[in-house]
Amino acid sequence: MSFSVEERGRENTADYRLYFKNEEEKYISPFHDIPIYADEAENIFHAVVEVPRWTNAKMEIATKDPLNPLKQDVKKGNLRYVSNVFPHKGYIWNYGAIPQTWEDPGHRDGDTGCCGDNDPIDICDIGNKVCSRGEIIRVKVLGTLALIDEGETDWKVMVINVEDPEAEDYNDIEDVRRLKPGYLEATLDWFRMYKVPDGKPENQFAFEGEFKNRDFAIKTVKDTHSFWKALISKKTDAGELNCMNTCVSDSPYCRSAAEAEAVVDSTSD
């Protein structure tokens, strides 16, 4: 299974979009159409890279736009860039999301006591490769951190690209602590401080900032997949989310390839 991307608009402007296509050159939604599993039996997941390591532009899946392209977040009319928080430069992992997952804002998590943040679940890929924006990678889940962002549960799932030459050495969160000393502490520090330069307070965490292990993280990912299933089948109110897709054939939101092409054609060249 292969995917490609198509740029629209000019980079570093509010018009910039990155649309996705499947191997049939059909426009798809990275939120809804890319399968969650690359290998379900082995718990290998697909992940969409939104922000390559060491970069600062806050790119994200546009959950409220048709076909959910990648676009740059805008705050108070300005494009959003994450500040460098000493000693870090931009994002310290390849940052992205697992498709076909959704942190339901109507579901209060029994562990964190907070509802979901209305987005796909986030990933931090610790592999050696600096990925490209929009790249689809296959990942192993290693653990998770429970960020509480303005009162919402915002899981950060630690993963490694299965193509990484060291991937076989990483199977749980303690492997990260052992083989990349200081990386988990840097991750906790980064998420605590990254909004402070914008005048916001430090972020808080559930479990006192403890990273939960692989089994806990995989269960969390699968829970968010079940929330997505309810969303895409209209069993849950989508609110402002756009659930247009071209491949989930039993979804009431599924649309034709021609309708998807019309969406892309209506955007900037």
Image: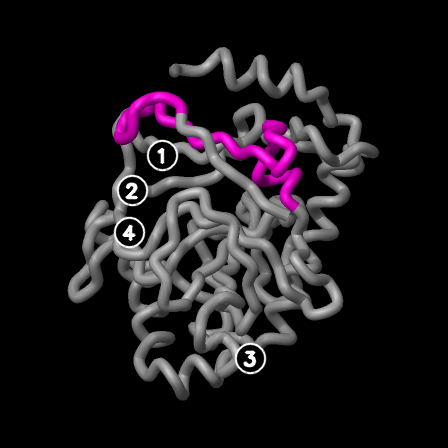
User: Circle 1 sits on which residue?
Assistant: 72
Residue pictured at 49% horizontal, 30% vertical: 19
Q: Position of residue 8 (x, y in %)?
A: 40, 23
Mark 3 vs 4, N-terminal side: 3
User: Circle 4 sits on which residue?
Assistant: 195
10 Å crowding of disc 3: few (<14), some (14-19), many (20+): some
Left or right, 65 with respect to 59, comes to right
10 Å crowding of disc 1: few (<14), some (14-19), many (20+): many
Pointer 3 with pointer 1, Cβ within 8 A:
no
Q: Nearer the viewer, mark 1 or mark 4?
A: 1
Mark 4 vs 2, N-terminal side: 2
**Residue range highlighted in magenta:** 8-34
Is residue 133 part of the magenta span, yes or no?
Answer: no
- Kind of residue indicated by mark 1: Gln
- Kind of residue indicated by mark 3: Asn
- Kind of residue indicated by mark 4: Lys
10 Å crowding of disc 2: few (<14), some (14-19), many (20+): many
User: Circle 2 sits on which residue?
Assistant: 57
Q: Nearer the viewer, mark 3 or mark 2?
A: 3
Q: Position of residue 156 (x, y in %)?
A: 48, 61
Q: Main secondary structure of the magenta part?
A: loop
Marks 1/4: CA–CA distance: 17 Å
Left or right, 119 with respect to 164, comes to right
The disc at residue 171 is 3
Pointer 3 with pointer 4, Cβ within 8 A:
no
Mark 3 vs 2, N-terminal side: 2
10 Å crowding of disc 4: few (<14), some (14-19), many (20+): some
| Front residue of 100 and 205 | 100
Residue pictured at 33% horizontal, 83% vertical: 181
Marks 3/4: CA–CA distance: 31 Å
